[in-house]
Image (cartoon, helix red, strand yellow):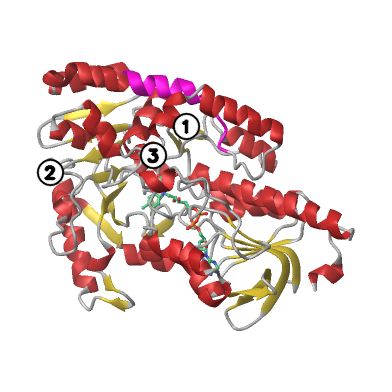
Amino acid sequence: MGATYDAVIIGAGMGGLSCGTLLAKEGLRVLICEQASKPGGYCVNFKRNGFTFAPAVHYLNEFGPTGQMNEAFQTLGISPEIEFCPQDPQRRIITPQFQLTLSTDIDQFERDLIHLFPKERLSIHAYIEEWKKFVKSIEGLPLKSLEVISPKEKLQLLYKGILKAPLLIRYRGKTSQAVLDSFFKDPLLKYLLSFGARKGSSILNCASPIFWALTGNFYYIKGEGVEALPQLFLRQYQAYGGELSCNTLVTKIQVERGEARGVQIDGGEEIRSRYVISNGDSHATFHSLIGKHLLPNRFIQKLRQKEISAPIFTLYAGVDLDLAQMGFDGSLIHYYPFMDDNPWEEKDGGEFDVSKEKMAIRMDSIKNPMLAPKGKHTIAVAAYTPYELFADGETVNPRYTQIKEEIAQKIIGATEQVIPGLSSHVLVQDASTPLTYERETLNTHGATMGWYLSAKEFSRIRSQRTPIARLYQAGHWTFPGGGIPMVILSGINAAKLVLKDMRKFTNKFRVPLLSPKELL
Ligand SMILES: Cc1cc2nc3c(=O)[nH]c(=O)nc-3n(C[C@H](O)[C@H](O)[C@H](O)COP(=O)(O)OP(=O)(O)OC[C@H]3O[C@@H](n4cnc5c(N)ncnc54)[C@H](O)[C@@H]3O)c2cc1C
């Protein structure tokens, strides 16, 4: 690790890696400081007794032939050496009463829904037609920040976004609840089509699965799973000369006269840099790494008002069941053990019961056999679980281990309705609580996607600049939002902002681009 850099990036999540790769490609001297022992953030694998599990990422969008990742990979100079395979069907929905499949054959999904809810026939048809129109209208609309595109691109974006996609304007600030209420009466149908949306959720929750089905935009990585992605980025980043320092916790962002000038790492060492990009959690970046006293009050107040995305509990099991022979094909299963006729009601820690929550069941080793020993399989089951069950502020619940085990057992019990005999075939078992996710990635309360994308937050145009000059954000706490493709775009946008500001600065002061004096 040297002492001076053009840019220091805090965190080697996919947002940080993407930002670093573009900056290094453009010839900047870049250092990524990552507190974990390897890069990837949430996009990693871990092993237990010969089984490989992914704690978070299990599907990828925008990686197909027409997806936005093609341009992103070109921009970064990365050749997609790994195999992205379509997941079709996208998901199987299982409830105690019925089963449904959501695939690229969306008309079949419509027929199946009508069969189950015949009274809502016309509304179901109108609903699916509306999303078909919506998808068509936003085809080819790039997700680029207005801050980095040329005036010509801005005009094109406005033309496509406003004139050609009126549905985008119509639904921009709407909640999933409002949209579903405007189409349907049956509460169970609304619950099903909410796809896990919370009170106040933007339309992304209810619409995305239908969009992905319509466009076939749902992929997985063949072979060793999701960790191949950060490794691919890392190789290219390092080929451009980028440096990565793992096990390096950033404890402070150095601010001088309102400008970021580098970072301090655990142990006190200072690393000077012209630009700092935070791929970490927004709360930590502004409250701990900078400090309230250096930030405008209005900004701090706004941060306080924002909600974070819902945390998840994931149970992992390595089993000696032949899942393929039992009829499973490796598609994602959304299991609804309980059909809630009031999905918008928020449940606090006291009345929370995980056995009633929607569960996402993955059996990744069916499609990627190298994830499990021969003849055995991996199962991961994820469900929403409140953070407050495990910790109260800074204090970990003294019953943490017991609660974790109780929840794991409840999830196994519920999953047995889908995978009969599961409990007596578990060879390896582990679990991630929201606290585990928080500890591993430093995302507050184990937030899955950064800020909660409420309808209000969704309709806001977010900047990747911060009140501190030369400090930017990249990743799921900023534009455009959560999920792997979004944070890759976020990283690219942040890098473009740095390059743009660098040119502006260089022109203004007529100094060489990488003046060593400027660095010190
Ligand atoms: C359970 C779960 C399931 C998910 N499923 C999917 C899915 O299927 N598909 C999908 O696209 N998305 C999914 N997501 C969301 C996706 O994983 C995230 O949106 C994305 O990985 C965030 O990437 P990021 O680069 O913004 O940050 P992160 O992945 O959070 O990485 C941030 C990195 O910064 C490091 N860091 C933070 N602070 C510091 C510091 N002070 N010093 C040094 N290092 C620091 C952290 O250690 C971490 O490595 C899921 C998330 C979860 C939790």
Which comes sooner in the sequence, label 1 or label 2?
Answer: 1
Write the residue at 19% across / 68% down: 403
The residue beneath circle 1 is: 85
The residue beneath circle 3 is: 173
Q: In which quarter of the image is residue 329?
A: top left
Q: Is residue 447 left or right of residue 180?
A: right
Asked whether 268 or 220 is in front, the reply is 268
Q: Is residue 5 left or right of residue 507?
A: left
Per the rendered image, the range of residues in magenta is 129-143
The residue beneath circle 2 is: 338
Q: What element carries label 1?
A: strand
On the image, the x and y values in percent for residue 104 come to 37, 22
Which comes sooner in the sequence, label 2 or label 3?
Answer: 3
Looking at the rendered image, the quarter that the N terminus falls into is: bottom right
Q: Is residue 82 left or right of residue 344?
A: right
Label 1, label 2: how many angstroms apart (C-alpha)? 32 Å
- Based on the picture, tell me whether residue 88 belongs to the magenta stretch: no
Which comes sooner in the sequence, label 3 or label 1?
Answer: 1
Q: In this view, does 103 lie above or below 485?
A: above
CB atoms at circles 2 and 3 under 8 Å apart?
A: no
Circle nearer the viewer, 3 or 1 = 3
Asked whether 196 or 146 is in front, the reply is 146
